[in-house]
Image: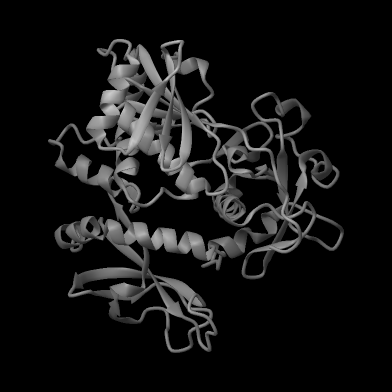
Amino acid sequence: MGGQQVRIPQEPSTLVAPLPGDEGEPSLEALAQNLRRAGLAAELDPKPDGKSARVRFEGRSFEVRVAPSSDPGEIHMEYSRLTRDVVEAVRMSRWSVGVRTTVGDAPLESLHGQLRVLSALAPRAVAMLDLNACAPKSGDWLRDAASSKVPPGPTSFFTAHAVFSEEEGEIWLHTHGLRRLGCVELEILGVNREEAQELHQLLNTVASAFIDKGVPPAGEPFPAGRKMPLLWLPWEEALKHVQPKLGGLEDHDEIHGGATGVLLAPGDDGPETPRRYVEALRDNPLLYISTAETLRMAAQARERLPQFAELVAKYVAEPKWKFLMKLGYPIDDAEKEDDREHLWFEVHGLAHGQVDATLLNEPYGIARMKEGDRGSHSLSLLTDWTVFCPRGRYSPETVLALLRGLARPAGNAGLN
């Protein structure tokens, strides 16, 4: 992304942990004890009001506050992402612990630190409410993320909502949570429901790139993928080029206002919706992921490779299970170490630092490899993996939830 990056004023990041309904109001001393029990090298500095404190951890400052829990209906949250048991636990909660911080120049590391502090302060949290992203997560997700040495991916810290109208036959895609990361909130306007899945993928890719590389100037084209240029315009200016039935003036309220940009594709007659890329997005698209994000994904995939290997050993022969692995191979005539094409393979087995797998897509820049080739590959090339099973799709970030679900007795198999 060329040009001078656009700087967006960062909103503070606020994460809230509702406590179990049987827990009373925690004292600041109790929170300090929780920090010590967690073994976190952090100190809690109480404020005179007796309800709040400051925590210093890994060179960052976090504001901590104890407050009565809010009714789930009073907060703009997508509770459909949680199981009914977790939603009921949130509803029954009487007290919550909140942690607030300004993210700064290392967003994922800062937010990971915020997760670790919150998990240590509230080890029995029934959920985590991300007020910026309007996204709840289970208490198990919070503890899993905090226990990892690798930060969760960018998509864990923003949400792309899809607002649909049967009457209008149109979808409005928009994000929550990016402004705390120094980005504009992004939207895609004027597309139909059948295109939502592919454009949601595109929205996530662009938002993740903005978090890592910064926001390019409005109106300046940038590559989102191979032969896939995009640009963004401030919402008011974008309405000169797109006339949506959803996402217009009446929909931009207090929650959906602020610094907002609309993703568009450069066209012969001016910017237009990116719907022209839908077919390409359905057909093995080459979307660009930054080197930093590739390294983060690879580190997380390797950290939780033992869990993946355990599942492969037990279920690889099961017809309703599928195991995929992404490997980064140097492209032909590569000039740099990170000039790699990241290819998906179906896994048949793992042994001795190798994976037996079949290539699932045709490479763009590696002539010797063809779709459908089966062979042995070094796990040193690992950059990601995915598990598909009757319970859904699982990544290195969520695999611990799958293992917990599998360990539950039959009839109690819901995953948080």
How many numbered marks, from 0 up? 0
Question: Is residue 318 something one can see in this rendering?
Answer: no
Q: Position of residue 411 (x, y in %)?
A: 17, 32
Quarter where residue 182 is shown: top right
Residue at 31% x, 22% y: name it: 31
Frontmost residue, 345 versus 56: 56
Residue at 58% x, 50% y: name it: 211
Q: Position of residue 82 (x, y in %)?
A: 37, 31
Quarter holding the C terminus?
top left
In this view, the residue farthest toward the left is 409
Quarter where residue 220 is shown: bottom right
Position of residue 234 relative to residue 117, above or below, is below
Position of residue 121 relative to residue 225, above or below, is above
Frontmost residue, 298 versus 240: 298
Position of residue 205 relative to residue 286, above or below, is above
Quarter holding the N terminus?
bottom right
Frontmost residue, 104 versus 14: 104
Q: Position of residue 204 (x, y in %)?
A: 55, 50
Question: Is residue 109 something one can see in this rendering?
Answer: yes
Q: Position of residue 37 (x, y in %)?
A: 22, 31
Left/right of residue 153 with respect to residue 86 in the rendered view: right
Residue at 70% x, 30% y: name it: 257
Q: How is the image coloured?
A: one colour
